[in-house]
Image: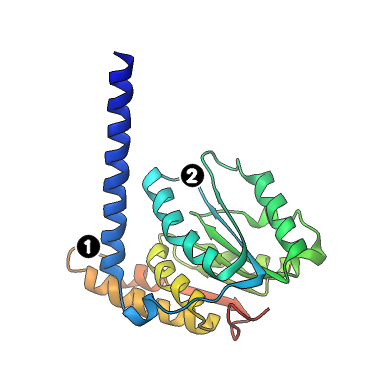
Amino acid sequence: MLTSVSNMSTIKTTIILFVSVLLIFAIVIYMSESPVLLFQKIKKQNNIGAIAIRDNVIPFQKFGTRLYTYPYLNACYGNVVYLTEYRKDEQHSEFVNRLNDLLDHNSCVDIYLLAHANAYYKWVAELDSIKRKKIRMVYNSGCSGAGQSEIWLHLGAKSYVAHKGRESISPVFYFYFLRRWCAGYTLHDAVDMANKCMETKLYRFNKSVYYDSLQINESRGNCFGQSNYKLANE
């Protein structure tokens, strides 16, 4: 009896995983664009590190975010840390320690905050101020994250990319932004082109789902600080 229950549980888990993968690929296909960009060669930068953190959301979102993000980061950064939270703030110590290690062993580090409204800057503030100057680009997908721009730049970040809206549709921007940033666009161009692609796709999507113009506009990525460099520039 126990074996039968265990087998049913395994089958159910497998089905859920399979359906999740299909949904993710369906989303990717819907958002897809130029094959040239999709298959453009990405060069690994061995002296540049990256750390990403996904907050505690539903399993589908956790799975999808990692499935999309990690291969890109691993392809172009020499050292990558990807963390997922299953309880609020459970990765606090791990994040601080791993970021500290990345700063010690890389010429610069990019930070990806793949989370809803957050205050991860408080964790970063625990690090030595000299080390924090090696933080290069911070991307924050959280709603109203643009309000933290002065904090992040004061902490030492070279650039900060975030969204103004309280209900921003940041995942769509991020989909286009990460691909371009990893493909060698300057930060300015990666943000600008991601905004244009996001707006085009959302206005087309409006035929079935309603997004008002203000929400779309406030979902735009905003770049604070320097933006005239590429991922390969240390």
As displayed, is residue 63 above or below residue 224? above
Query: Can you identify the residue that label 1 sits on?
Result: 209
Query: Can you identify the residue that label 2 sits on?
Result: 56
Displayed quadrant of residue 139: bottom right
Residue at 26% across, 60% down: 26
| Residue 99 on image: x %, y % | 69, 57
Horizontal side of residue 141 vs 129, given as left or right: left
- Give the distance between the C-alpha atoms of the residues marked 1 and 2, in whole angstroms: 26 Å
* Depth order, front residue of 89/99: 99
| Residue 94 on image: x %, y % | 66, 46
| Residue 180 on image: x %, y % | 46, 77
Badge 2: few (under 14), some or many (20 or more) residues near its Cα, within 10 Å?
some
Horizontal side of residue 230 vs 220, given as left or right: right
Q: Quadrant of the C terminus?
A: bottom right
As displayed, is residue 83 above or below residue 45? above
Q: Quadrant of the N terminus?
A: top left
In the rendered structure, find residue 175 and report the number of the disc placed on it: none
Badge 1: few (under 14), some or many (20 or more) residues near its Cα, within 10 Å?
few
Residue at 27% across, 66% down: 29
Residue at 51% across, 49% down: 55
Secondary structure beneath disc 1?
loop
